[in-house]
Image (tube, coloured by chain):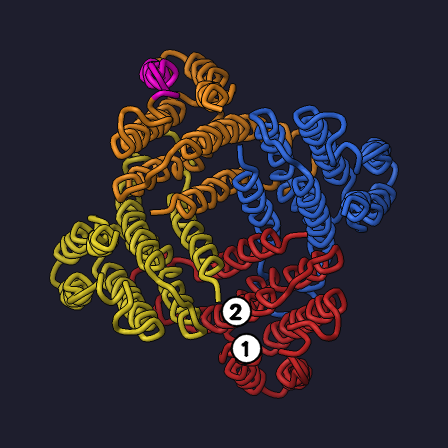
Chain colours: A blue, B orange, C yellow, D red
């Protein structure tokens, strides 16, 4: 089974998710700096989610680059990941419109957590299909980033009731950790060449 | 005629359908667990339709994988399928917003039925173009899934007036039957290799 | 210059246009057969526009299939076509929501006319780049369909003030003429093979 | 790392941006020439932004055509460009709905400026990865267009408070400068062949 269509479909869904999120940045009806300033939290939450979707696209790109075989289970693990990513516009909009209130900020963390678990499941599924000696398995190695991120989210969700800003700081911290593209895979490829 | 653009266009439309459906999950204006809880039926109907579109994408992917020739008629049979699939967001939104009321739940079944018929027509059309000995014809075989699904929908539509939950149970049952990717085609391919 | 990205971008825009049009089919707030029946004109206008976009996609697909060279001018002629096609959702929504009133039905014809002219310009542009002996020039031949369609639209636009149904009949007639895929190109390809 | 998926993802996002902008052209509720005439500024701003996105797509297409290597930094420089382009629908809608008022017209210039800077950064990033003797570096040369455009925007932003029409004239002027596809790259390719 070719991975081309899997990549194309995922790219399509990710491209639409990233662009649909901007629709939450609703055009204000009046012309004033105040009207624009009120959109500030929506803009910030949009920028954060844009970076997250960008990270997922980037890592997805790297992961499939070193994948050989794509069997039936991988297609569904991929759709499962896209399902949770498709909830980003909703979670982002609710958090932004309510100026980072506790409950929406916690829900944002839940969606991040589910997407992280789905990504990890997809990775396991690809390794299961391609064998423990496949390029992806070797490149990912101990995968401390993939293991640390859910812990950050798990901490951030209840902490939103203390202060949503702590949760947001944790979300930003995880984004910064991942912002560096998955050098493990690039290094592995360079070592093989 | 190359099938590449047919796949790309279908992927594009399916990716947009799957993502547009999430727009029915409208961001609530107030911050409360109740506001979120009220979205529960919309979320459930979204998840069900996401799985259905995923099944269609998956089977479409498998079907075109074993297709050799794509003539004019196939392009239109494919557009016909996409037409009915494009009504999923509407049917899903109406059913979810009205908490699975009888009429919207029946209409959802009508759209599922039309999509199933359109998929069957597309399959017949591809077999007609590629000959009765083509890989798809051999792989599909007796096609009991394709024949049983419309019967389930036909039963579910009138039963919605008795209880929409019976209809929903039937929709979920069909989804579960299909959730397993089309092993017939994978098995056939393995047998040929 | 490769035509792959031109096809991919056009497919993307056409896929989004076709799917965005369905958003005009707004989910009714109440649950009744009447609420659904009121959507009938919107549904009909959506179906007509879906077929039109399908025709454009189909013919675009055939046209680029026999195109060799894609120079700068072709990219802009293609964007010009996409511009007018991108107005389909607006024109369709206005016509459907106002139950085929005279003015929106005339405007729909204007958009159809502009898209037809843009398609013809793109065809001329490709022939100019590829030479009068190229496959497209030979396949298109006298191009009576391409020449007749704008005349139909030109007649339909003023006739909407007499009766929008005459205009609609003309729009449907043109769609039926084109619904047959561009056999000229397929025949030509078969003759060459 | 293949550039195919980078192109596909960018095409997807650009296709969606260009089509989402048309959603700001909201279907009027009444049927009259006046209702349509009121949409004139929204239509004009849509047409201007359509041309701008077309220019970006065109130049992006040319730039990646002569790019050999796509490393991690390029992926993020590309996402950064897409981020600013994704704000086009918002800036376009606000400017059009407020009939080219001073503040939205200035904000439109800010988004144009940021996109131009992001495009320049992406170009620098590609040249850094591919070396100063790469095809892109030679083709771009002194890049007077890329250097002049931000100056036009920088002038247009404050001038909007004097008269938004001066700003708009500057935006149109820059669009006209770029409307010609990047002949530098085409000429370079022809010279190499």
Q: Is residue B154 magenta?
A: yes
Vertical comparison of B131 with B188: above or below: below
Disc 1 and disc 2 on one polypeptide chain:
yes
Q: Could you tell whether D128 is left or right of A90 in the image?
A: right
Q: Chain of mark 2?
A: D
* Label 1: how many Cα within 10 Å (few below 14, some 14–19, many 20+): many
Q: Position of residue A76 (x, y in %)?
A: 58, 28
Q: Position of residue C188 (x, y in %)?
A: 22, 56
> Pointer 1: what residue?
D182
Q: CA distance from mark 1 to mark 2?
A: 8 Å
Q: Earlier in the sequence, mark 1 or mark 2?
A: 2
Query: In this figure, which residue is indicated by the disc labeled 2?
Result: D58
CB atoms at circles 1 and 2 under 8 Å apart? yes
- Residue B68: quadrant of the picture: top left
> Helix, strand, or loop for circle 2?
helix
The chain under label 1 reads D
Q: Position of residue D178 (x, y in %)?
A: 54, 79
| Picture layout, residue B38 above or below residue B70 | above
Q: What residue is shown at x 26% (from left), y 44% (from top)? A: B72
Q: Nearer the viewer, residue B128 or A85?
A: B128
Could you tell me which secondary element the residue under label 1 belongs to?
Answer: loop
Which residues lie in the magenta part?
B138-157
Q: Residue at x 29, y 29 (%)?
A: B127
Left or right placement of residue B171 versus residue D140 in this view: left
Magenta stretch: helix, strand or loop mostly = helix
Please state which of residues C138 and B86 is positioned toward the viewer in this rendering: C138
């Amino acid at each position: 089974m070719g991975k081309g269509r899997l990549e194309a479909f995922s790219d399509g869904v990710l491209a639409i998710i990233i662009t649909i999120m901007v629709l939450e940045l609703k055009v204000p009806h009046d012309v004033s700096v105040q009207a624009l300033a009120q959109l500030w939290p929506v803009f910030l939450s949009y920028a954060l989610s844009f970076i997250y979707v960008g990270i997922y696209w980037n890592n997805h790109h790297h992961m499939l680059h070193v994948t050989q075989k794509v069997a039936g289970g991988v297609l569904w693990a991929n759709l499962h990941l896209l399902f949770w990513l498709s909830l980003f516009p909703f979670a982002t909009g609710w958090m932004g419109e309510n100026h980072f209130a506790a409950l929406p900020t916690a829900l944002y963390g839940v969606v991040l957590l589910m997407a992280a678990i789905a990504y990890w499941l997809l990775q396991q599924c690809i390794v299961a299909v391609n064998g423990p000696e496949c390029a992806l398995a070797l490149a990912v190695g101990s995968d401390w980033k993939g293991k640390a991120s859910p812990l950050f989210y798990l901490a951030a969700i209840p902490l939103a009731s203390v202060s949503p800003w702590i949760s947001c700081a944790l979300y930003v911290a995880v984004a910064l950790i991942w912002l560096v593209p998955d050098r493990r895979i690039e290094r592995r490829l360079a070592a093989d060449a």
